[in-house]
Amino acid sequence: MANYGEMDFLIFEALAERTIHDAHIRIEEGVNPGYGMLFEERMRRCALACLRRGIRIITNDGSANPRAAAQWLVEFLRENGVTAKIAVVEGDDVKGYYETNKDNIFTPAIYQIIAGSDAFLPTDPSTIRDNLGSANVYLYYEPVREALDQGADIVITGRVADPSMFVAALSHSFNWNAGDWNKIAMGTVVGHLLECSGHSTGGYFSDCERKLVSGLANIGYPIAEVDDEANEVIITKLPGSGGHLSARTVLEQLHYEVHSFSSYVTPDVIAEFRHVRVEQAGENRVRVTGFVGRERPATLKVLLGYQAGYNIVLALRFRGHDALKRALLIGDVWSERLRHSANNILDSVYLYNDLPRAAALKDDPDPRYVEFRYSAIVEDRAEAEYIARSFAGFYLNGAYGGGGVETSVHRSAFQKSQLYDSIEKS
């Protein structure tokens, strides 16, 4: 796309809910400065070509430290004899605010938890308050547009909301008014259709039977051609690239991670996806119209990451005769061993081919392959590593034929979201 795409912007949407907290952990542990693990590779591959061809780059791959990402990029460009105007968008890191006001924020009256699953998740306010590792607010499009308005060739941000980068590019290009909610909704739909790499071009689409996708090994990522006057968007991809782009693939991505088609809430607008129309406009060309938006919400969302022990993931695999019986034996022996040892396991699960014991027996009582997997959360790292070493002994001291033993220990970090007063910290 950087070499051959006829584009104005190449946008790298690179953050998920977990990844920015992981970046904060990398800073703490000295692994890297806190920007995305693939930021350097992406820029090495694309930045020079984009600058040569006049394509501007926007990315939230700055993650927990966009300033450090920009500093690395400056050096990379200098080594290649290239200069560029690079903008950094900061302000999403609000951990200091939470630390200063934690006694007022983390109270049962103000901070309410809605349990969303049966998975272990310590959610009492005091646990989050005392173990807070990161707090990043989902920023809106305006600071990214401001950078573009000032002539930035490359804009590097932290936790800017996924579609907001696309809204910023279009708002800058067409000089949209801040309160034109239908236009901002159009930018939000564009962002939503492009943000998930190859989803709109057949990635995450094929079921191998009714929905076939060819060329997945060379899948092309989606490109949006936006006609501001006609209020329509064409989703397409590079000629000769693989994948499948049709009204069906675009419709699936339109539904992806959307809880309500009446109210897709972002920091920029409340978009009404129920009005969006998708139709085939040619081979690998899909027309999208019908953009309606309402005034943006008065509050913003903050992602809170907090330390909650260490994850243990242990696995042993069995193949052939009585594979499930052998795996069940290992599960029973492991359970007994843990009962007789002093440990502080906060939560755990036993799975056989990703199913609990009863479900595995019901699903297939005599499979030829079974993976026994044990996952747990333990408070102390040393204890977690001791438990993992103990499990490794099953390679030689368990039921016969066990292989592919796996043991891993890593920090368990949870994320919760909270609404944040956008006026107070605007």
Image: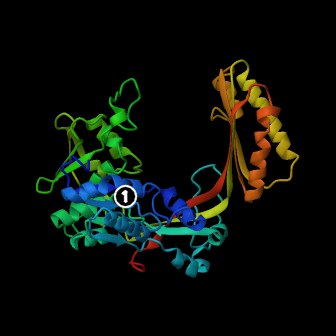
Q: Nearer the viewer, residue 355 or 95?
A: 95
Residue with the most extreme left position: 229
Whether residue 343 sits left or right of residue 280 in the image: it is: right
Residue at numbered disc 1: 162
Q: Residue 320: x, y in percent?
A: 69, 19
Count residues near mark 1 (Cα–Cα under 10 Å), then give few for <14, some for 14-19, many for 20+.
many
> Under tag 1, what secondary structure?
loop
Q: Residue 378: x, y in percent?
A: 73, 55
Evaluate whether residue 268 shows in this view: no
Quadrant location of the C terminus? bottom left
Compared to 368, does 252 lie above or below? below
Q: Residue at x 37, y 54 (%)?
A: 42
Residue with the most extreme right position: 340
Image quarter for residue 360?
top right
Q: Nearer the viewer, residue 103 or 45?
A: 45
Compared to 336, does 301 lie above or below? below
Compared to 159, does 94 lie above or below? below
Q: Residue at x 39, y 23 (%)?
A: 209
Q: Residue at x 35, y 28 (%)?
A: 211
Q: Residue 48: x, y in percent?
A: 28, 57
Amino acid, disc 1: Asp
Compared to 396, does 391 lie above or below? below
Whether residue 139 sits left or right of residue 338 in the image: it is: left
Evaluate whether residue 161 shows in this view: yes
Whether residue 27 sits left or right of residue 211 in the image: it is: right
Q: Residue 34: x, y in percent?
A: 49, 65
Whether residue 398 sits left or right of residue 279 in the image: it is: right
